[in-house]
Amino acid sequence: MTAALTREDVRSLGLTDRDFLRELDFTAAQLNSILDLAVRLKQLRKEHNEPELLLHKNLAAIFEKTSTRTRISFSVAMNDQGGNTTFLDGSSSQIGHKESPADTARVLSRIFDAIGFRGSEQAVVEELAQYSQVPVYNGLTDQWHPTQMLADFLTMREHQDEPGEQISYCYLGDARNNMGNSLLIMGAIMGSDTRIVAPKALWPEQSVIDQAHERAQDSGAQLTITEDLAQGVAGAEFVHTDVWVSMGEPKEVWQERIELLKPYQVNQAVLDLAGPHSKAMHCLPAYHDSKTVLGAQISQDFNLDGGVEITHDVFESRANISFDQAENRMHTIKSLLVATLA
Ligand code: CP
Ligand code: NVA
């Protein structure tokens, strides 16, 4: 039986009332303490022994972009902890078109205990936080996906061959978007062997690379940013990818993106290059077959039968741990909520 978890345990983490806008605002110790708390909460839930540390707390969750995992994770996490979630979007509220982030934040923080946001611009979630009296969480912007990083690091910890050793991973794909930026910066903060493997045109902005190198000096992280697939992948325990065209991008970019990224598809040959025990990771949703409207369209238009960013055979193999990642979204978002609100 896992030892009971009290409010005092949680408060001792020193994260009460903190916003969670981007990984750069946190130390490795703070991020690790959120992960350690997630491990405990996950175990307590399994034992049906979870304390309700967020009783009667209310979360406003603004989703300007679509979501499955992030949305259900906030909602189930609040519910498990005795709290409640109210979802808002642009079309059924005044947010965005009729009311500014500053005014929205001032209204919501009179009534709610915390605010979650998913949308395009990082500046919007930063403005919400600036004007809010309650913690604000970034559930994805074009620039960062910090709650995904908590789940990814918990999942890599759980699947490491040698627990506690330095984690090594590579990211293949569009690296100037949220997932590429976040995986580079998070690895730099956490002291990981972190490789970004992508065509130069899709590397993170220089300012992000510079910030990563700065944090790596403190953490001892090894950073590799390369176009060379074999060099970037060799020996990496975890091989991450993400969709090649992200939410909000026009469909016209598919043609060019496929030409750029086809050599960086996660397939069996790439996993073999990484090593015999390497695992495939994907934040999901993934284009790995033609069973969705968009998946069917892309595979037909571009003659990509066996998958786009990840092949169907790898996705359906034991090497794929993306459903563990998906489950861990909930445990880690719960940990973040408890750490900042309990
Ligand atoms: N990985 C992720 O953020 O999934 P959703 O878009 O479904 O929330
Ligand atoms: N890069 C993807 C991540 C989805 C979770 C997107 O922004 O659409």
Image (cartoon, helix red, strand yellow):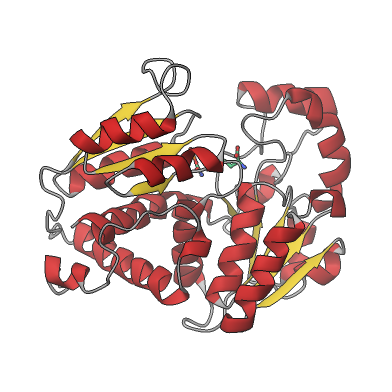
Residue 271 can be seen in this image = no
Pick the quarter of the image with the N terminus. Answer: bottom left
Identify the residue at horizontal 21%, vertical 57% (top origin).
45
Q: Nearer the viewer, residue 261 or 214?
A: 214
Identify the residue at horizontal 60%, vertical 64% (top origin).
185
Q: In this view, does 10 lie to the left or right of 74?
A: left
Location of residue 239 by image quarter: bottom right
Pick the quarter of the image with the C terminus. Answer: bottom left
Where residue 195 appears, as percent x and y from the top left, is: 72, 67
Where residue 329 appears, as percent x and y from the top left, is: 41, 51
As drawn, 248 above or below 126: above
Q: Nearer the viewer, residue 177 or 132?
A: 132
As drawn, 303 above or below 141: above
Total count of labels: 0
Identify the residue at horizontal 43%, vertical 15% (top origin).
91
Q: Is residue 29 left or right of residue 232?
A: left
Where residue 40 appears, as percent x and y from the top left, is: 26, 68
Residue 294 can be seen in this image = yes
Where residue 280 appears, as percent x and y from the top left, is: 62, 58
Identify the residue at horizontal 16%, vertical 44% (top origin).
57
Q: In this view, does 35 lie to the left or right of 287?
A: left
Quadrant of the rendered image holding ligand 2? top right
Location of residue 9 by image quarter: bottom left
